[in-house]
Amino acid sequence: MAEPLIAVLNGPNLNLLGLREPEIYGIQTLDDLEAVCAEAGEQLGLAIDFRQTNGEGELITWVQECRGRADGIVINPAGYSHTSVALMDAIHAVDLPVIEVHLSNIFTREAFRHHSYISMAARGVICGLGFTGYRLALQAIAEIVEQEA
């Protein structure tokens, strides 16, 4: 039996982890985050497809490509959380379990960050726990996929 495939999709500016606002996002890099996800996936018996883009259209395409290919999605839509109805619609359309994750606590930041369109389509949301949030999201998605198999 093949390992469940989980897409870990990351939106804009996450390629600048370690450089951009380290007081909010920390000093670890996107490569470090990918390693954390790969290790968690191995421990949980998941295959991980880890990606990052700065483009909204590309992120939407990746979500759509998960239909029929992946078993679940962990997504950090970053700034698109607060602006992209199109991304929310894509998540609804793929009919897969989705966990939204944010490195920072979006509810302790600027008011515009308190609303996420993606949360309306996600099974769950984890925010404010840094890289640990990704580990928890992968654990949750693994349990959901197993229960729904």
Image (tube, rainbow, N blue to C red):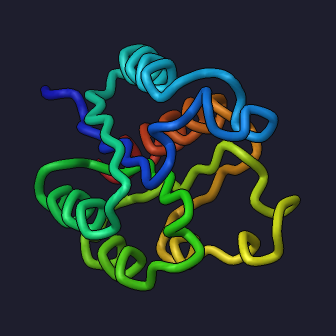
Total marks shown come to 0
Q: Position of residue 66 (x, y in %)?
A: 20, 56
Q: Position of residue 31 (x, y in %)?
A: 43, 21
Answer with the quarter of the image where residue 132 lies: top right
Nearest the camera: 71 or 127? 127
* Vertical arrangement, residue 118 with respect to residue 7, above or below: below
Q: Position of residue 87 (x, y in %)?
A: 37, 74
**Is residue 79 rendered to the left or right of residue 107?**
left
**Is residue 146 rendered to the left or right of residue 138?**
left
Q: Quadrant of the N terminus?
A: top left
Q: Residue at x 59, y 75 (%)?
A: 82
Q: Residue at x 26, y 35 (%)?
A: 49
Q: Residue at x 43, y 58 (%)?
A: 98
Q: Position of residue 141 (x, y in %)?
A: 45, 44
Nearest the camera: 27 or 106? 27
* Vertical arrangement, residue 132 with respect to residue 143, above or below: above
Q: Is residue 149 visible?
A: yes
Q: Residue at x 52, y 63 (%)?
A: 123
**Is residue 103 rendered to the left or right of residue 95?**
right
* Vertical arrangement, residue 149 with respect to residue 55, above or below: above
**Is residue 33 rendered to the left or right of residue 132?**
left
